[in-house]
């Protein structure tokens, strides 16, 4: 229950942060850790969007600390690095959150802030999955487990690139879809165009990989239990491209952009479940080696 609640809160936190960015409310509280010098800030919608982001972050942090401490007590050896990393990344995330406000949202720092938050989300998912009592930590990097981990890394990189494109202000560097500047291969006249077009290319690569994965799972009898998950990942990949196109065509509507991130998180969760199934199929709950 604690693990699921933590993952759910972190999911909400990431999507809410996306909404705050889409509404240009990131500096509605220009100071930190207070907001307009107060614990309870003035009642204005943009201020409370940012303020609630901080409140959700605080609640999620408490849950993550509790989960990490519980897993640290139950894990052995090198597996304890997982909750330790989660705690260290949480501290870094809090510090970067304050710096993003005080430095007025620099592009590189906001992107790293998002990437760190996404890593914390994935570590929380891992701790939710392996409780250390009934399911011991097992991180095999072979067979289908390695395939799913590599694909998760690709989706993580794509989400990070998307965050960079957004914070760079390159969301409309290609203002049309499916073409970019009226061409299938646009003139790479500026860094924003290159970043935006690269994001589209990686999206296409993920869709092709999702199709290949689904066909592989359908043909391999050993992957029977993964067919539904593989189909879900394929459908989410297709939906993600459609939502991404809608983000452009609606000129970066904040709700559509938040949905774009929510679908990406859903893709990572599906890949996480595929990976867990692969770990179980490998046998067998081998613990990580001792430190």
Image (cartoon, rainbow, N blue to C red):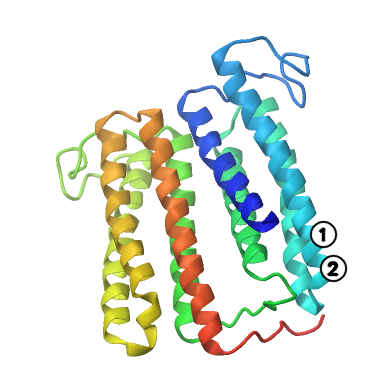
Say left or right for 180 vs 129. Answer: left
Q: Report how far apart the C-alphas of labels 2 and 1 lie in the structure.
A: 6 Å
Disc 2: CA contacts within 10 A as few (<14), some (14-19) or many (>=20): few
* Cβ atoms under marks 2 and 1 closer than 8 Å: yes
Residue drawn at x 47%, y 43% as measured from the top left: 163
The residue at which mark 1 appears reads as 69
As helix, strand or loop, the secondary structure at mark 1 comes to helix
As helix, strand or loop, the secondary structure at mark 2 comes to helix
In the image, residue 197 sits, relative to residue 49, either above or below, namely below
Percent coordinates x, y for residue 132 in the rendering? 74, 74
Where residue 73 is drawn, which disc sits there? 2
Q: Is residue 188 visible?
A: no
Say left or right for 100 vs 162. Answer: right
Percent coordinates x, y for residue 62 in the rendering? 77, 45
Say left or right for 21 vs 3. Answer: left
In the image, residue 148 sits, relative to residue 169, either above or below, namely below
Disc 1: CA contacts within 10 A as few (<14), some (14-19) or many (>=20): some
Percent coordinates x, y for residue 61 in the rendering? 73, 44
């Amino acid at each position: 229950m604690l693990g699921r609640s933590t993952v759910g809160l972190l999911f909400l936190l990431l999507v809410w942060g996306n909404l705050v960015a889409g509404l240009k409310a990131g500096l509605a509280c220009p100071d930190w850790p207070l907001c307009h010098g107060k614990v309870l800030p003035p009642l204005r919608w943009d201020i409370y969007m940012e303020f609630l982001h901080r409140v959700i972050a605080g609640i999620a942090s408490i849950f993550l600390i509790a989960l990490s401490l519980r897993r640290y007590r139950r894990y052995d050896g090198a597996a304890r690095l997982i909750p330790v990393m989660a705690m260290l990344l949480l501290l870094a995330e809090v510090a970067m959150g304050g710096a993003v406000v005080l430095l007025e949202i620099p592009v590189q720092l906001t992107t790293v802030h998002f990437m760190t938050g996404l890593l914390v989300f994935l570590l929380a998912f891992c701790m939710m999955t392996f409780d250390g009592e009934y399911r011991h930590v097992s991180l095999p990097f072979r067979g289908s487990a390695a395939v799913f981990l590599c694909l998760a890394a690709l989706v993580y990189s794509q989400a990070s690139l998307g965050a960079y494109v957004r914070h760079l202000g390159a969301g409309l560097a290609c203002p049309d879809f499916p073409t970019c500047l009226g061409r299938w291969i646009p003139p790479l006249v500026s860094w924003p165009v290159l970043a935006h077009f690269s994001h589209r290319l990686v999206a296409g690569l993920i869709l092709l990989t999702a199709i290949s994965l689904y066909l592989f799972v359908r043909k391999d009898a050993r992957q029977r239990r993964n067919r539904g998950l593989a189909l879900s990942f394929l459908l989410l990949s297709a939906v993600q491209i459609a939502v991404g196109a809608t983000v452009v065509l609606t000129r970066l509507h904040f709700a559509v952009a938040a949905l774009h991130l929510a679908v990406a998180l859903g893709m990572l969760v599906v890949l996480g479940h595929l990976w867990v199934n692969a770990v179980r199929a490998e046998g067998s709950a081998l613990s990580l080696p001792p430190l």
